[in-house]
Image (cartoon, rainbow, N blue to C red):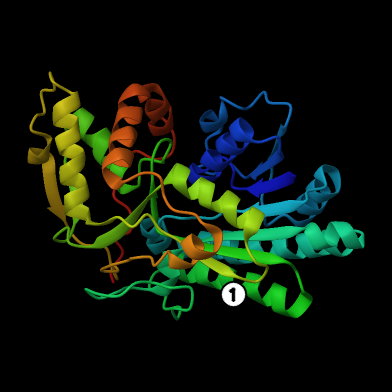
């Protein structure tokens, strides 16, 4: 296959590309604008592969998208490019609307023009795989799970923009017949994640003896999905998924934010024998909660398990240990990231 992957320099996109080029013979084109969270250092291991090509481009640029389609001639698109951090969406929602909504629209139109020009056999094999988030469903109480038929109730500018992009993809399928697949995933974690997200932020701060910020009481619950498990799920959906269907992807790992941070601290205490900051949980600091903070997310992944035979390989215990060990062994990557635009400042503190 010839896969055009948008957002391939981001956290999930780079994991997907590394996995594809290590385990398959697919040709991959990576389309990325290289905003603050896009990092080509995450792709050093495969950057010289003859099956890999990088395009520095913005999905909002229709001319660039048309050119890339004409040149690369993909057999499938995997759309991961997005602004993705809730706190940033609170401070600056405009960028999220532009990239996640307008960008998805622009990409859909370039895809549609390209797909309509294919011969019948190529058009029947073509797929547009849209990768989204469980945050579009809103928040859960103490019980219940998000299923593929859960009503959308986004509560942040980020989740609203992703919900909008989901609806656009669905509309382009029903209106124009574009062969689409959709996935909504739970919280990803693992190597190469930008350090504004909880787990890498905690690791980075702990190494420096800085406070480990936890919003509110730390009782918000998330389902945690190891990024390589997610990449395998995306590949499974692309290969076997039914056109027009949505598949929820979860790690079956519900934990409170406080539990996650405490567990990271315990692993750091074990691995950093000579750390001056032990026990690392003494660095925990409860801070003002995020405006509109969803209480609980939890995925029902029954559909993808029953229909496509995918289940996660990592438990939270094994995946979290691998993640902490990776950050400890790759401090140079982290230092390069922190030399850039993000300096671990608190975002998303606008008045609710």
Residue 15 position (above or below residue 89): above
Counting from the top left corner in percent of width and height, residue 264 is at 21, 39
Please name the residue shown 34% across and 47% down the image. 197
Choose between 305 and 132: the one closer to the eye: 305
Residue 31 position (above or below residue 349): above
334 vs 199, left or right, is right
Which of the 4 quarters of the picture holds residue 245? bottom right
Q: Which residue is mark 1?
A: 167
Say if residue 166 shows up in the picture. yes
Counting from the top left corner in percent of width and height, residue 154 is at 42, 74
Give the total number of marks visible in the rendering. 1
Which of the 4 quarters of the picture holds residue 151? bottom left
Choose between 246 and 110: the one closer to the eye: 246
Counting from the top left corner in percent of width and height, residue 108 is at 72, 64
Choose between 327 and 249: the one closer to the eye: 249
Which of the 4 quarters of the picture holds residue 62? bottom right
Say if residue 157 shows up in the picture. no
Q: Residues within 10 Å of mark 1 (few under 14, many from 20)?
A: few
2 vs 40, left or right, is right
Please name the residue shown 74% across and 79% down the image. 175
Please name the residue shown 22% across and 48% down the image. 260
Q: Looking at the rendering, in which quadrant would you find the N terminus?
A: top right
Counting from the top left corner in percent of width and height, residue 240 is at 64, 58
Q: Looking at the rendering, in which quadrant would you find the C terminus?
A: bottom left
236 vs 65, left or right, is left
């Amino acid at each position: 296959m010839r896969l055009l992957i948008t957002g391939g320099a981001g956290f999930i996109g780079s994991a997907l590309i590394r996995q594809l080029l290590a385990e398959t013979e697919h040709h991959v084109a990576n389309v990325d604008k290289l905003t603050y969270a896009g990092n080509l250092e995450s792709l050093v291991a495969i950057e010289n592969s003859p099956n890999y090509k990088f395009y520095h481009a913005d999905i909002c640029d229709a001319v660039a998208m048309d050119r890339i389609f004409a040149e690369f001639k993909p057999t499938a698109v995997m759309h991961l490019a997005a602004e993705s951090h809730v706190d940033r969406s609170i401070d600056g929602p405009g960028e999220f609307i532009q990239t996640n909504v307008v960008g998805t629209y622009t990409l859909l139109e370039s895809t549609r023009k390209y797909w309509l020009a294919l011969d019948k056999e190529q058009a029947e094999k073509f797929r547009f795989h849209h990768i989204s988030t469980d945050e579009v469903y809103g928040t859960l109480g103490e019980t219940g799970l998000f299923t593929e038929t859960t009503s959308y109730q986004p509560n942040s500018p980020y989740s609203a923009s992703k919900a909008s992009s989901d609806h656009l993809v669905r509309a382009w399928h029903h209106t124009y017949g574009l062969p689409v697949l959709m996935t909504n995933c739970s919280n990803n974690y693992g190597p190469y994640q930008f350090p504004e997200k909880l787990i890498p932020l905690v690791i980075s701060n702990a190494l420096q003896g800085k406070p480990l910020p936890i919003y509110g009481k730390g009782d918000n619950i998330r389902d945690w999905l190891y990024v390589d498990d997610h990449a395998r799920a995306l590949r499974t959906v692309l290969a076997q998924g039914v056109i027009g269907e949505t598949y929820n992807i979860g790690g079956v790992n519900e934990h409170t934010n406080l539990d996650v941070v405490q567990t990271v601290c315990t692993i750091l205490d074990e691995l950093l024998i000579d750390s001056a900051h032990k026990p690392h949980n003494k660095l925990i600091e409860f801070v003002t909660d995020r405006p509109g903070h969803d209480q609980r997310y939890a995925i029902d992944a029954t559909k993808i398990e029953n229909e496509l035979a995918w289940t996660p390989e990592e438990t939270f215990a094994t995946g979290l240990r691998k993640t902490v060990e990776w950050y400890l062994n790759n401090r140079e990557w982290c230092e390069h990231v922190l030399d850039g635009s993000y300096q671990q400042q608190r975002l998303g503190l606008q008045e609710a």
